[in-house]
Amino acid sequence: MGKLDDGSPVWIFFEKINGDKEVKCRKCGKTYKYCLNTSVMITHLRSDHPDDLRKAENERKGKNGAKNEKNSRYDNDANSNLIMALSTSNVPFRFVKNEYFKKFCLLLNPDHIVMSPDAIRRNW
């Protein structure tokens, strides 16, 4: 798949640790050296969690019919409110990359993919 941005579905399953030098799989706990791309993580997901990766990719591409339409409506509302919250509180857009904010969002809705700072800038 090559190099992907922070909007990649792999970030649903991985978190950066040790000062962003490593990544840890949230499903099984395996850790890998982080080399500024998602290749190792994708390989891990394809071999160890293929069904989970396929589901995440399908949801991202919008292949889940009515369920995805509902999620899409939710995601649009969530993203709009996130943009407004960041914009009206003088919080930098890079806050969405904060490890604890990502964990918080994952607890609220494991299927939601938080917008990247660049995507927020494009939509603002």
Image (cartoon, rainbow, N blue to C red):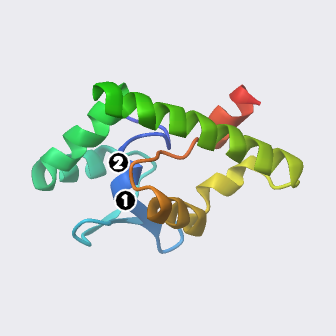
The residue where tag 2 is placed is: 10
Q: In this view, does 34 lie to the left or right of 51?
A: right
In the rendered image, residue 46, in percent from the top left (x then y), is placed at 16, 45
SS of the residue at dot 2? helix
Amino acid at pointer 2: Val
In the rendered image, residue 51, in percent from the top left (x then y), is placed at 14, 46
Q: In this view, does 79 lie above or below 12?
A: above
Q: In this view, does 84 lie above or below 30?
A: above
Distance of label 2 from label 1 (alpha carbons): 6 Å
Q: Which residue is drawn at 70% across and 27% down?
A: 122
Q: Residue at x 88, y 54 (%)?
A: 90
- Structural crowding at the residue carrying mark 1, measured as other residues with C-alpha within 10 Å and reported as few (<14), some (14–19) or many (≥20): many
Q: Is residue 120 left or right of residue 25?
A: right
- Which residue ends up furthest to the left in the rendered image? 47
Can residue 24 be seen here? Answer: yes
Corner quadrant of residue 109? bottom left
Q: In this view, does 30 lie above or below 64?
A: below
